[in-house]
Image: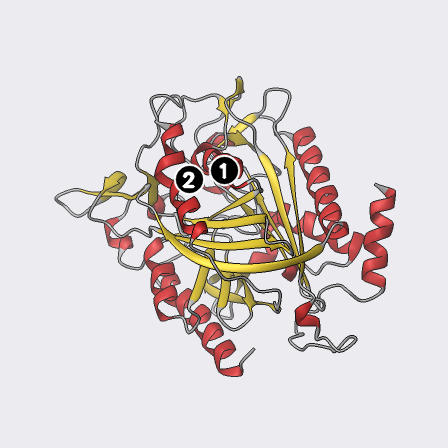
Amino acid sequence: MKNLFVVCFLLFAVKMGFTQQSNTSVPIKGKSLSTLFRASVEKINITPKSPQWLLGYGARKSMGVNDSIYHRIVALDDGANKFVLVSSDICVLSPAEYDRVAAKLQDICGIDPVNFWWTVTHTHSAPELGSPGLPAIFMGDRYQHEANPEYTAESEEKLINGILEALKNLEPARLGVGWGFSRANINRRALDVDGKASLGMNPDGAVDRRIGLLRIDREDNSTLALISNYAIHGTVLGGENLEISGDAPGIVADYVEQKIGAPVLFINGAAGDIAPIYSVYPNPIQGHLKEFRVLLGDKIIEANSRILSTTNEVKLNSGATVVETPRKPGLGWPTELGSYTRTNDDGKKIVQLPIRFLNINDDVVIWSAPLELFNEISNEIRHRSPFPFTFYFGYTNGWLGYLPTAASWEQGGYEVETVSPFTPSAENDLKKAVLGYLEGRSEEGF
């Protein structure tokens, strides 16, 4: 551990760390830094060896393991900037948990939090990690038990060590991008004759079935890592299941890894109103969990095979903005999330919603938020984006609840009535901010 700290400190000391505003290339020995693209990947098992409290449904403790869960880490370095992306087989994280780990990482090796994204796959069959945050306000009855402090500390240590290893093991790389398609998901807001919504299946509802892919290859064109972005709730297994599992995202990632011979980071999308086509079953067999290897895994493999062009000329540029939008009247707020809210001059409570961005060259942009976002919103942003490859990474850097469409508030339902801290104006506030940022970046040029 000490040696890793030294390596990371030296990297930072020679100014190879991130600079948030930098978007220029500095010539080195006749080459621009944009030609020095490097990358690395780490996969770390975080399956607990003892029973743990699980998150996603009512309070329940694990009684076994169906399949292992992991931190998967990719580090990217364009010669001027470094960027770290993590995908963990966990349900949700409090932004306070992300902030704690981001601060540790910055202290150890100078990685600015704007360049450290920690996403979770949203499996509902994984241990609680860290303090509950907003879920304790929405559903306090689920948290009337002791937490998992030892598991949290162990997972944090494994994550930080894995990131340090990734920064240490950067190697020359190439990057490719592509799209795929899968019918493994379905809208989950079932509508009755009165127009009211409840959790169920809605085959006529909006859905996002695109797969977004970023593939990282070594210099010899062998695959180093695959980043797969798809919107699907991790709820094939329901509350009766007491076995730890990565659910559909974990099963799919493991399967694709076996087929392509490289780690796969499954990054969930705007799954706030999207379920897997088999949902909330008591066990993996009844839930057809393995079938998702065909329904989604094979579609990822097929899409990956169509990425025929890669480049080692890669330029990274990260950024951030904060969307201010009204807080639901009368809603309480955790003390540890004090930096995510404020009171305006009129005495109204405001949510301060952090949004992150990553531009890759001229044609790729990724935006992320600590949300369960309704897919109609990310679909519209992608459609209106000036960048041909626009990806949304959900459940990133924490969880600040569901952000539904404005129209869904009249329909009601769980997402609107129970687990959203927002008001109907949030959709427009978010779209205005994100599209304004993307349009500004496009006009400025890379």
How many numbered marks are there?
2
- Above or below residue 428? Residue 172 is above
Residue at 73% in and 77% down: 26
Looking at the image, can residue 351 be seen?
no
Q: Nearer the viewer, residue 18 or 112?
A: 18
Label 2: which secondary element: helix
The answer to whether 222 appears left or right of 386 in the picture is right
Query: Disc 2 or disc 1, which is closer to the eye?
Result: 1
- Above or below residue 7? Residue 243 is above
Q: Looking at the picture, how far across and down is residue 388, in whole percent? A: 42, 68
Q: Looking at the picture, how far across and down is residue 227, in whole percent? A: 52, 50
Where on the picture, by quarter, is residue 378? Answer: bottom left
Q: Amino acid at mark 2?
A: Gly
Label 1: which secondary element: helix
Please tell me the numbered disc located at residue 297: 2
Please tell me the numbered disc located at residue 259: 1
Residue at 50% in and 62% down: 309
Q: Nearer the viewer, residue 166 or 418?
A: 166
Q: Looking at the picture, how far across and down is residue 363, in whole percent? A: 48, 70
Q: Looking at the picture, how far across and down is residue 354, in whole percent? A: 54, 61
Where on the picture, by quarter, is residue 429? Answer: bottom left
